[in-house]
Amino acid sequence: MAIRIDGKVISAQVLDGVASDAAAFLDSYGIKPGLAVVLVGEDPASQVYVRNKIARATESGLNSIEHRLPMDTTQDTLNQLVADLNADPAVHGILVQLPLPAHLDEEQIIAAISPEKDVDGFHPVNVGALSVGKESLVPCTPQGCMIMLEQVLGDLSGKHAVVVGRSNIVGKPMAALLLQANCSVTIVHSRTPNPQALAQQGDILVAAVGRPEMIGADWIKPGATVIDVGINVIERVGPSGGTQRKLVGDVDYAAVEPVAYAITPVPGGVGPMTIACLMKNTLVAARRLQQMSGV
Ligand SMILES: NC(=O)C1=CN([C@@H]2O[C@H](COP(=O)(O)OP(=O)(O)OC[C@H]3O[C@@H](n4cnc5c(N)ncnc54)[C@H](OP(=O)(O)O)[C@@H]3O)[C@@H](O)[C@H]2O)C=CC1
Ligand SMILES: Nc1nc(=O)c2c([nH]1)NC[C@@H]1CN(c3ccc(C(=O)N[C@@H](CCC(=O)O)C(=O)O)cc3)C=[N+]21
């Protein structure tokens, strides 16, 4: 039986730390750290994430401000909102939920967020800082994966880590953090001729593909530690014949669990860690902004 890496338990530990730091921040400066979440459109999955983020923020003693904009929002309107949030001293962190509707330019919006308030760590300044090892605001999902890996494995030095996926929000920053932790890192993607053969060499396997249960037991080196980033909603025929909506990862948990040393479930794995790290980043940003303002 593999160790089940419990994202709910570990994220609760992270959030405990955030809550005491937020209380100390309030004591020192008389304001709560503020997180602004911007959601454009009506994507139901995105709404669930936004709701969860706001609930965790409130529980941790952060001030969370939600901005919901209609699907037909223009680039100018969104830019104006980001400019207002950049200038607002009560806002320490800004998150624009991705993906944006197709008519909006994501790259431009990300670049418009003040790097000091970029709690997603997606701004080119923060991406560059991470790649030269001077990271400040580290992307939440990979940060959460690292906390889980270090809790279960301790020092990661010398391990071979295979990351499946190379997106800017998960795969690439994940690979950067693993390299910084002295792993040898292989990144596989849709143009890799035989990704499975490379994955089988990983002491650590991180799956961030977006394909439900694609990673089976035949991708896994026996005794590997498996981190499943995937969040996929699938429809299955339930026991009584009707269709059920179910959340599954990129890893076939039932098949992989018997061969792995440790594995994260979906739900209850990486997802809650992402949210906890977002709160952590908001505190990091708040402290730094407050120090910069010299008060
Ligand atoms: N738990 C959490 O907090 C979060 C979960 N997610 C989830 O993680 C998953 C990945 O998200 P994200 O990185 O944004 O997704 P993207 O779609 O941006 O990236 C997917 C990556 O997987 C690669 N890929 C696709 N098919 C294959 C294949 N058959 N073999 C090997 N590689 C393949 C793609 O390659 P190529 O580049 O060549 O196209 C791409 O690099 C999704 O399920 C998403 O919902 C995302 C963010 C946070
Ligand atoms: N700018 C931006 N930053 C992001 O970090 C970002 C984003 N856009 N767009 C979408 C993805 C996805 N994402 C998730 C976060 C938490 C859960 C999460 O909490 N999941 C729970 C269950 C969710 C549920 O309640 O059903 C779990 O896995 O246990 C999932 C997915 C953040 N993302």
Image (cartoon, rainbow, N blue to C red):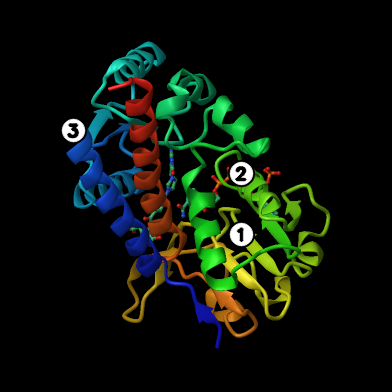
Q: Is mark 1 within 8 Å of ligand 1?
A: yes
In-image side of 238 versus 251 (left or right) = left
Q: Tag 3 or tag 1, which sits nearer the N-term?
A: 3
Amino acid at pointer 2: Pro
Q: Residue at x 66, y 64 (%)?
A: 156
* For residue 175, above or below residue 123: below
Is any part of residue 190 visible from this angle? yes
Please state which of residues 12 and 225 is positioned toward the viewer in this rendering. 12
Q: Quadrant of the N terminus?
A: bottom right
Taking the spot 24% from the left edge, 51% from the top edge, the residue there is 60
- The part of the image, by quadrant, that contains residue 29 is top left
Give the CA separation, mark 2 to mark 1. Answer: 13 Å
Q: Which residue is mark 3?
A: 31
Q: For marks 2 and 3, give the one nearer the viewer.
A: 3
Q: Distance of mark 2 from mark 3, alpha carbons?
A: 32 Å
Q: Residue at x 67, y 66 (%)?
A: 204
**Proximity of marks 2 and 3: CB atoms separated by less than 8 Å:** no
Q: Which residue is mark 1?
A: 207
Query: How many labels, in total?
Result: 3
Which circle marks residue 173 in the picture? 2
Q: Secondary structure at mark 1?
A: strand
In the picture, residue 281 is in which quadrant?
A: top left
Which comes before the other along the chain, label 2 or label 1?
2
Amino acid type for the residue under numbered disc 1? Ala
Q: Nearer the viewer, mark 2 or mark 1?
A: 2
Classify 10 Å Cα crowding around label 2: few (below 14), some (14-19), many (20 and above).
many
Q: Quadrant of the C terminus?
A: top left
Q: In front: mark 1 or mark 3?
A: 3
Q: Position of residue 290 (x, y in %)?
A: 32, 27
